[in-house]
Image (cartoon, rainbow, N blue to C red):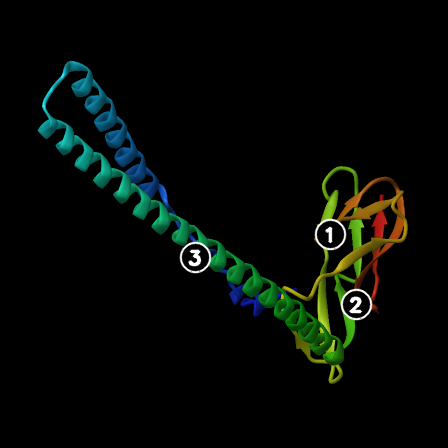
Amino acid sequence: MASDTSVLSKLKFGTPTATHGRAITFISVLLVLAAIGLVTMIMFSAAGQGDLAKDILLAALAFALATAGVALIALANGMGTKLMLEAVSIEAQYINSTELIQLRQKLLAAVSDRLNNLVVSPATCALDATTTKSAQMTCICKDKSENDFKPDEEVFKLTWHSTNTAAATVDGNGVVTRVATGQANVIAHFNGFESTACAVNCT
């Protein structure tokens, strides 16, 4: 039993996205150019070239280093902003998680207040070792006026129980499977409520 549309499934959490790959590449290129300029200037000096070439290279080197410094500052600011946004996002997700828990509790309380009893269907089930080894159980919710209703699937979680697992077992989805010859009652539980039993006869 589950509603077609879940209230809780509509809640979505966003995740921040940020990248600094371009800035890092840009800074790396500038630093490489500065290094090339510095090596070239040393080579000119060793070769005894004129001061004009040296001045040009020094100016280019200074410009590259200054630009790289500005880019590093911008990158640091960007990283700081990214960390701040991630911290805000984590806090928002924590708040949303708290609200999600509170909403789940409210929905659970609403279902429990409306629920009068749980009816397992079918009421009897015959299993054998050849043709019918398993069967699907369903559970119907009845309100205080004995009308059927469908709780939200996010909060209506049943647990199933077999009174004789040596004869028949039941999984979390209500599928009963024959184990050996014998009888067992299959019962569903929800938030303190116990369903009617399905009498399983295994031959």
Q: How many marks?
A: 3
Q: Quick one: 32 or 192, which is closer to the camera?
A: 32
Residue at 83% x, 46% y: name it: 168
Q: Residue at x 75, y 37 (%)?
A: 130
Q: Is residue 150 visible?
A: no
Residue ID for mark 3: 81
**On screen, 102 above or below 38?**
below
**Residue 144 locus on image (x, y percent):** 76, 83
* Residue behind mark 1: 172
* Percent coordinates x, y for residue 29 in the rendering: 27, 34
Query: Please, what secondary structure does the residue beneath circle 3 have?
Result: helix
Residue located farthest toward the bottom when viewing the structure as drawn: 145
Q: Nearer the viewer, residue 166 or 57?
A: 57
Q: Residues within 10 Å of mark 2 (few under 14, many from 20)?
A: some
Q: Residue at x 80, y 63 (%)?
A: 189
For the N terminus, the quadrant is bottom right
Can residue 75 be seen here?
yes
- Write down the residue under mark 2: 191
Residue farthest to the top? 47
Q: Tell me residue 155's x, y (percent).
A: 67, 66
Q: Amino acid at mark 3?
A: Thr
Q: CA distance from mark 1 to mark 2?
A: 15 Å
What crowding class fits label 3: few (fewer than 14 Cα within 10 Å), some (14-19), or many (20 or more)? few
Tell me how far mark 3 sits from mark 1, CA to CA.
47 Å
Depth check, mark 1 against mark 2: the one in front is 2
**Circle 2: residue type:** Asn
Q: Along the polypeptide, which appears first: circle 3 or circle 1?
A: 3
At label 1, which amino acid type do we have?
Gly
Residue 44 position, x and y percent, is 16, 20
